[in-house]
Image (spheres, helix red, strand yellow):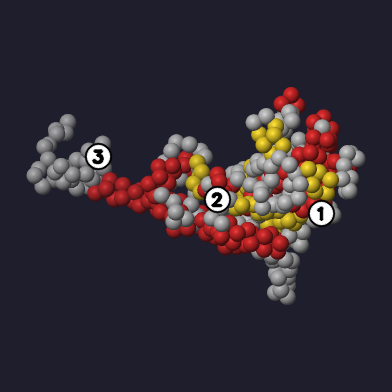
């Protein structure tokens, strides 16, 4: 039987069945294994790279289509609807349509000639959704380029709140709105609004009044006609004439300064129709700064102030006596002083020297005792009825909510001196 012969030193070492052929290095890996792993890794990297290339290519294609080839319209809330639309051009390159300013809700107020006294301008309110912002500090810095009045620290604080709605600025112009929209800040939105403007400033300021932040009237005709102004966009035409108003204001201002008066008022009225052509109260204020006007300036002395009529009431007394048939033009009245209780009704010594005056003379010299005799002849009951029918016990009949109610003595206190 053949015997096993040990291999000589020069013979080939038998191959191990569990190890691939090839040379070995102490502590290393087979070269075939490493080459195989490198080939597999290169293939995988190539596949991943091609995948990313495809994704970025798709994103770039979509961005090109969305911004260059077929740009998408911004969201309605991203840019407010009151921003004017640019008219499109026709095939000939000419602009079609008109450049129309956005409509506003509240109607314009004009004088009798059509001069605008109050009108609304389109504005926008800027608000943000802090949950959509990436960098509040960067957003604040960008916003301050358009709205420098914003406080940077406060704006950053508001933009960092864990809320979905915070106001940033109110009543910005359409130009500012477009500028902010062009900044492309995510999470910044606009809300359509309007702001009331009074182009003539101080002219008829107390008559105009003002509106609040929600565009509702709070004083003057703005308040009296609030429902009408917000429901009908047809201009509201007043009986005022700004030309007469301006002249009355200048003349009244000069008189106030000449006599160092603390206040003054004047009314110009058409006696045939009762229409008020001018109404001035001094001191006054700029209607565009209603919120900072002092109370004394906002006080309309022409309709809110209460004053004793004085000698002007003698005209009512004479008319009352004539209408009731108590007195006649040819009647004569004593000018001798009348003593009623602790009161003495007399004339000034320089008024006249006649002890008796006819009815025209009573008015010409404004005699106090003679007018008192007419009132006494009429009597308290008929006097009250006549004054009530003439409207002296009611509010001033004018379309202003500030119109005051007269201070009238109670019937039980209507004594002889009254």
Residue that mark 2 sits on: 262
**Mark 3 and mark 1: span between their CA atoms?**
125 Å
Say the numbered circle drawn on residue 271. Answer: 1
Say which element carries label 1. loop
**Could you tell me if residue 308 is visible in this image?**
yes
Q: Residue furthest top?
A: 412
Q: Residue at x 31, y 47 (%)?
A: 37
Q: Quadrant of the C terminus?
A: top right
- Residues under numbered marks 3 and 2 in contact, where contact means CB atoms less than 8 Å apart: no
Q: Residue at x 51, y 43 (%)?
A: 167
237 with respect to 212 (left or right): right
Say the numbered circle drawn on residue 19. Answer: 3
Q: Residues within 10 Å of mark 1 (few under 14, many from 20)?
A: few
Say the numbered circle drawn on residue 4. Answer: none
- Observer-nearest residue: 348 or 403? 348
Is residue 215 placed above or below 17 in the rendered structure? below
């Amino acid at each position: 039987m053949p015997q096993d012969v040990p291999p000589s030193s020069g013979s080939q070492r038998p191959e191990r069945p569990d190890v691939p052929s090839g040379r070995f290095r102490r502590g290393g890996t087979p070269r075939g294994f490493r080459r195989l792993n490198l080939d597999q890794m290169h293939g995988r990297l190539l596949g991943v790279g091609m995948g990313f290339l495809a994704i970025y290519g798709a994103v770039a294609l979509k961005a090109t289509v969305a911004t260059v080839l077929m740009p998408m319209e911004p969201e309605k809330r991203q840019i407010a609807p009151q921003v004017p639309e640019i008219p499109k051009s026709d095939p000939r390159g000419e602009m079609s349509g008109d450049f129309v300013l956005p409509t506003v809700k509240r109607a314009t107020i004009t004088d009798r000639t059509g001069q605008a006294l109050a009108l609304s301008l389109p504005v926008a309110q800027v608000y943000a959704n802090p949950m959509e912002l990436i960098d509040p500090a960067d957003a604040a810095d960008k916003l301050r380029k358009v709205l420098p009045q914003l406080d940077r620290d406060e704006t950053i604080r508001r933009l960092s709140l864990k809320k979905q709605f915070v106001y940033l600025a109110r009543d910005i112009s359409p130009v500012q709105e477009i500028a902010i929209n062009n900044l492309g800040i995510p999470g910044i939105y606009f809300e359509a609004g309007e702001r009331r403007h009074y182009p003539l400033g101080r002219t008829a300021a107390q008559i105009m009044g003002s509106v609040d932040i929600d565009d509702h009237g709070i004083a003057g005709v703005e308040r009296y006609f609030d429902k009408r102004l917000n429901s009908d966009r047809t201009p509201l035409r007043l009986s005022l004439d700004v030309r007469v108003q301006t002249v009355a204001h200048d003349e009244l201002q000069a008189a106030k300064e000449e006599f160092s008066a603390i206040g003054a008022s004047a009314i110009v009225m058409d006696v045939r129709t009762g229409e008020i052509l001018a109404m001035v109260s001094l001191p006054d204020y700029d209607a565009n700064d209603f919120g900072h006007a002092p109370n004394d300036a906002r006080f309309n002395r022409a309709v809110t102030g209460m004053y004793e009529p004085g000698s002007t009431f003698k005209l009512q007394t004479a008319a009352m006596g004539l209408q009731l048939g108590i007195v006649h033009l040819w009647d004569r009245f004593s000018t001798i002083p009348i003593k009623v209780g602790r009161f003495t009704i007399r004339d000034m010594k320089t008024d006249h020297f006649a002890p008796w005056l006819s009815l025209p003379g009573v008015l010409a010299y404004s005699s106090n005792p003679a007018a008192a005799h007419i009132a006494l002849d009429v009597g308290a009951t008929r006097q009250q009825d006549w004054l009530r029918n003439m409207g002296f016990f009611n509010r001033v009949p004018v379309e202003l909510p500030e119109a005051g109610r007269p201070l009238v003595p109670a019937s039980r206190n209507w004594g002889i001196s009254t």
